[in-house]
Image (spheres, rainbow, N blue to C red):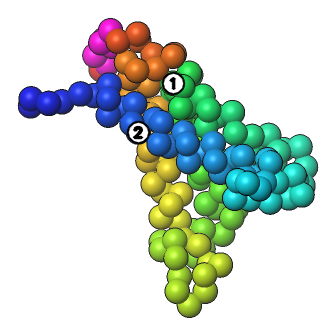
Amino acid sequence: MKGNNPALGLFILRVVVGVVFLMHGLGKLIGPPFPGPGMAGWTGMLRDVLHFPVPGLALILGIAAAPVGWLLALYMVIAAVTGGHFAAGFDVFHFGDPMRRGYEYNLTLIAASLCVALGGPGGWALGGSKGAPEPPRMA
């Protein structure tokens, strides 16, 4: 099909998902002006490491896209299970109880992260193929 540009598509996906994770991580690490509790919400070293925004920045730049994509997908599965999102149902917004958040947002970020992990960073990435097409992979 004329007009296909997989490198541009992967670039857009990678940058948008990376910005979402970066902003989410900065809110948990720093707090205002980013949405989140900052260090006041810190409850232990493991939580601090899991919320560190470096994976979001790596994704934006296209550095180690496959392992970062897998890591972020796993993180979102853990967040959906331990954060009560699966128990709250699918919808992210429940009009009767605005604090009850479903898993649709988690599912979207899991799918996007897996797309980057499986598709690679594309040609427009610091860690990518420098614009050269990648060899085809056998499934």
Asked if residue 59 is among those painted magenta in the image, a careful observer would answer: no
Q: Is residue 70 above or below residue 34?
A: above
Q: Position of residue 67 (x, y in %)?
A: 57, 28
Q: Is residue 133 above or below residue 52?
A: above
Which image quarter: residue 100? bottom right
Q: How would you rate the neighbour count of disc 2 (Cα within 10 Å): few for under 14, some for 14-19, many for 20 or more? A: some
Q: Which residues are magenta?
A: 132-137
Tell me if 40 is positioned left or right of 56 in this view.
right
Q: Residue at x 32, y 25 (%)?
A: 7
Q: Callout 1, which amino acid? A: Gly
Tell me if 135 is positioned left or right of 80 in this view.
left
Q: Looking at this view, is 135 or 10 the one in front? A: 10
Asked if residue 135 is among those painted magenta in the image, a careful observer would answer: yes
Magenta region, main secondary structure: loop
Q: Looking at this view, is 79 or 22 the one in front? A: 22
Q: Residue at x 32, y 29 (%)?
A: 8
Residue that label 2 marks: 13
